[in-house]
Amino acid sequence: MSLNLAVILEESTKRNPDKVAIIFDDFKLTYAQLDAAANQVANGLVGAGIKPGDRVGMMLPNVPQFPIIYFGILKAGGIVVPMNVLLKDREVAYYLSDSETSAFFYWDMFAKDAVGGAQEATSVKKLIQVGLAPAETPDGIDDFFAFMGTQAPTFDSVATKADDTCLIIYTSGTTGKPKGAELTNINLFECCHLGTHIFTFEPETDVIMAVLPMFHSFGLSNVVNGGIHGGITLTLMPRFDADKCLEIIQRDKVTLFLGVPTMYFAMLNHPERTTYDLSSLRLCVSGGASIPGEVMKAWEQSTGTKILEGYGLSETSPTATFNQIETGQKVGSIGKPVWGVEVKIFDEADKEVAQGERGEIVIKGHNIMKGYWNKPEATAEAIKNGWFHSGDIGYVDDEGFLFIVDRKKEMIIRGGFNVYPREIEEVIYMHPKVAEAAVIGVPDEKFGEEIHAVVAPKPGETIDAEELIAFVKERVAAYKYPRTVDVVKELPKGPTGKIMKREIKVGAGKEQEAPAQA
C-alpha cells in the first residue's frame, strides 16, 4: 500500500488553502504557503542528491521552518531524524553517525554544537543553517534561504509505502546509548488520524498550542501531525514561559493545549494568571509524566476546562492510552487503550496477570515501531511475539482503566523530558576524581523529578559538588545534568558488586550539596 505521511498536509491544503496553518507571533502562513514552501525544500533536497530512504537530520526549535522542512523531507521520501536543540556536540555526532544522516538542518543559535557534531559525523554531506533571516555562512554550509532559492513551489511527493520508515526518533534504555525508534508512515498516520477523532477538531475555530518541542514524539505526532491533518491552526512557542504562554492563549484564542505537568503547574502558580482570558480553551491534555490530581482539579476550577491524561512512548508513535471523553475519565489514570491498540499487564514470564495485579505494561497495535534502527537484538528484546514491552509497571482496575505505579527501567522524567541515568553516569565517570557514581531521580515540585548524583571519590581525592555539576553540564544537554550531588565514601552494593540504587539515601553527603540551578 502506497502512503506518504506528507499527504496530511496536501489534503488539508486542498480542502482549505487560505486557512492559516502557522502563527509565530506576528508571522502567519496559510496552508497553501506552507505546502509550497515544503515543496521548495523537497526540490532542494532532491537537487542536493537526497534519495528516498536517506536520513535527514533536524535540530530546530518550534519555529515556522520546522514544519516546512519536516514536510519537505517527507515529500522527498527522506527519513526525518529530529534532534533536541539542547544536545552538545558529542551527542549530535552520535545521533548523526548512528543514523548515517546525509543532510542536516540546524538552527543558527545552536551552530557551535550542531556544526561541531556534524564535522565528526562522516556521513553528513550537506549542512544547512536555518535562521529567521538570510545570513552568511562558512564555506561548506548553506543558508536555508539560499538553499530554497529559486526552487519550484510544486513537487510530486515520492510514492513511499505505508510500512516504510519515515521517522527515526531517538530514545534510550538503561543499558547503553540512545536507540533510534523507526516509525513508519502508517504508524504516524494512524496516530494523527485517531487524534482528529479524540479531539474532534473544528477546523474553522480550533487553534492548537505548539509549545511541546516539535522534536519530541508528543509534540511532533500529536500536535504537528494531528493539527495539520485536522486542518486547524498551530500557534508556535519556541520555549515555554508561563507568562508568554498565557499571553499567546489569550491573543490567539487557543482552544487546544497539550502540555506536560510542569507547564500546568507554572501557569496555575503565575501571580497574574487571573488577569488573562483563558475562556477560549475547550480541551487540555497532559502527558510525558504523571500529573497530580490536585493540579488537574485546580486547573479545571480555574479555567473551566478538563485536563485529560494519556500515555505513550516514542516506540508507540506515541499514543497508546487516553482518557477519552466518550469512554470516561479517572483522575490518576492513563485511561484506556485507543482504537486499534491492545494493552495488557504481563508478569516476568510474559504471562498476563489477573485484573488488579501489578506487572509490566505491554502494548500491541498499529502504533508499534518497526524496530530500533540497526539494532536487531534491542528490537527483539523490546518486542516479543508482537507485544512491545514498555518497562513501566502498572495495573488495570475493574473498569478497565490503566494506572502506572512504577518504572521498571531507571529512566528519570524531568519536566516531560526523558533522562537516562546510565548516560549521565558515563559522563560523571569521565571526571578524574570519581571512583563510583549513581544517578537517580528525586521528587521535585516544579519538574516532577530532578536529577541527583551520588558519587564516591578515588582514594586521596576530594570532590567539589559544584565543580562536578559544571563538568557534566559542559558535556550533556541542559536538561540532563544533575542539579544536586551527594559525595559519600562508598555507594551501597549487592553481592555481585552492583550498585544498589534503591538503597541510596539521598542527603548522605548533604554538606557538599550544590545549590539548585534552573
Image: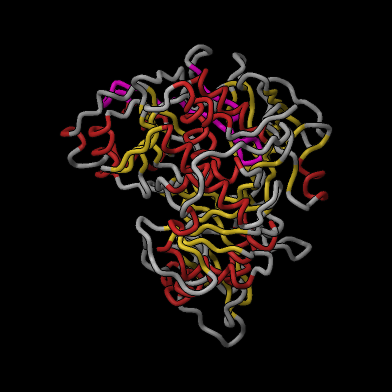
- Residue 350 against residue 53 in the figure, above or below: above
Q: Eyeballing the image, is 452 above or below 17? A: below
Give the camera-side residue of 339 and 309: 339
Q: Quadrant of residue 90?
A: bottom right
* Residue situated furthest left in the rendering: 275
Residue 99 location (% of width, % of height): 69, 56
Q: Position of residue 391 (x, y in %)?
A: 68, 41
- The answer to which image quadrant residue 134 occupies is bottom left
**Is 439 drawn above or below residue 294 in the view shown?**
below
* Image location (x, y in percent) of residue 221: 54, 36
Quadrant that contains the C terminus: bottom left
| Outermost residue to the bottom | 460
Total numbered badges shown on the rendered structure: 0
Q: Which range is magenta? A: 300-324
Would residue 100 be visible to someone looking at this image? yes
Left or right, 3 with respect to 60, comes to: right
In the image, taking residue 154 as reference, residue 22 lies left or right, namely left
* Residue shown at 75% from the left, 66% from the top: 497
Residue 304 located within the stretch drawn in magenta: yes
The residue nearer to you, when weighing 311 against 107, is 107
Above or below 175: residue 357: above
Q: Residue 210, percent across and down?
A: 40, 38
Residue at the (48%, 44%) spot, across then down: 68
Return the residue nearer the eye: 90 or 364. Answer: 90
Decide whether residue 363 is among the magenta residues.
Answer: no
Rendered-image quadrant of the N terminus: top right
Can you see residue 503? no
Q: Name the residue at 41% across, 71% down.
A: 511
Q: Residue at x 61, y 82 (%)?
A: 458
